[in-house]
Amino acid sequence: MIALIDCNNFYASCERVFRPDLEKKPIVVLSNNDGCVIARSNEAKKLGVKMGEPAFKKKDFFVKNNIHTFSTNFILYGDMSKRVMSILKQNSKEIDIYSIDEAFVDCYNENLNKYAIHLRNKVKKWTGIPVSIGIAKTKVLAKIANHIAKKHRKSGVFILDNQEIIKKALKFTPIEDVWGIGYRYAQILKEYGVNTAYDLTCIEESWIKNKLSIVVLRITQELKGINCFQIDSKNIAKKKICTSRSFGQPIKDYNTLKEAVSTFAVRCCEKLRKQKTCASEIKIFIYTNPFNPRHKQYYATKNIKLDRATNDNQIIVKEVIKGLKMIYKKEYIYKKAGVIVSKIIKEDQLQLSLFDQITNREKYSKISKIIDQLNNSMGKDKLRIATQGFDRNWRMKQEQLSPCYTTRIEEILTVKV
């Protein structure tokens, strides 16, 4: 059997762990630059706060209803996620981490209900994060079970383990709520009278394959209890890595823009080294604010191909700055920039090049690893390339950022006795 463990209102729950005074009070978490609502507590949902709503339009509403707002604190959320996932790893044969707040695990306990309740209580006790657990024979059914557990079970646990219960659950689930069925497929299926997950299981598989796709066919088979999506505990390397940000305030100055893209390039390199890969193609982009008609609009990109794949900070930053010089125009005011690395291969599969002009690659590699070690132990960007700058006026706006309680010693909670 497969269990899907999903953290409830994860970002809001992370904020509440270190603020017990916010228990049962409405919380919303805002996107980059405090733009839109991206997470809500149940209390905020009941007040009618919707996902994606612009925060500036709801400012008076938040104040009137005493809704607590937070800027996104990805450092805190990432660390809390690691803590939850480590508990799940200790209590399962295999784990397939699906997202920052979700994971599929292979259940090894015969008493599934006891296992799920014990695991749920353990995660809550050790991390403070509430979770819902759905258990079934396949991943798609486990998703449905988890949805029922979260919305309709006080215990936070629901198990689909017999055909009668499965049939009722499928009839209860709208087709658009089935994992993997997007809006377009849902609309097509509804035109043919397929309104629930159960209706989908009644359709001829050959029709699904011809009219829709092999993915929808596999989802249908999963709904019937046939395993098509196995638990994959291997970390698959990303084929493309992007680091981009909207600036906290518009930028016109070239040097400030250079600081930003240099930092984005370093972030890409860090991600490459973390998954032990290198990239041979870089793309840099800059653009103005399309929602500001008073300013002239400009969007530019530059693709750069390297002679040899690398994950070295100095090499990639140097190439990114070259690309920025080619596309930067001083008459525009920029709102966003980013760096994308692609053509990614494993470190141990690097090929030599006759035209490689960099002779000290091994030396550069050692420097990058030392920088990673120091920054991991002392804090992000304690050691950095000079072009990354220090003032960082371009950083995104985070006016309501909570402390990094678990990763910065100076922000750790203090208790008065």
Image: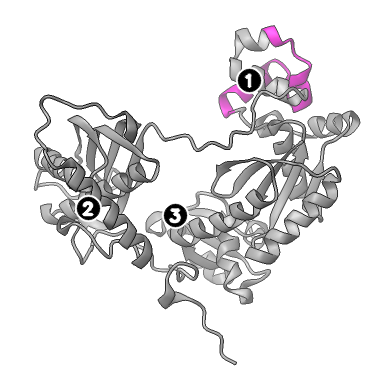
Residue 345 in view, yes or no: yes
In percent of width and height, residue 97 lies at 57, 42
Would you call the spot at circle 1 few (<14 residues within 10 Å), some (14-19), or many (20 or more)? many
* Res. 175 image quadrant: top right
In the image, the segment drawn in magenta is 182-206
Q: Which mark is residue 31?
A: 3
Compared with 296, 118 (above or below) is below
Disc 3 vs disc 2: which is toward the camera? 2
Residue closer to the observer: 257 or 52: 257
- Element type at marker 3? loop
Disc 3 vs disc 1: which is toward the camera? 1
Q: Quadrant where the C terminus lies?
A: bottom right
Whole-Å distance between the Cαs marked 3 and 1?
Answer: 32 Å
* Res. 49 image quadrant: bottom right
In percent of width and height, residue 4 lies at 69, 42
Whole-Å distance between the Cαs marked 2 and 1?
Answer: 48 Å
Which residue lies under the disc numbered 2?
Answer: 367
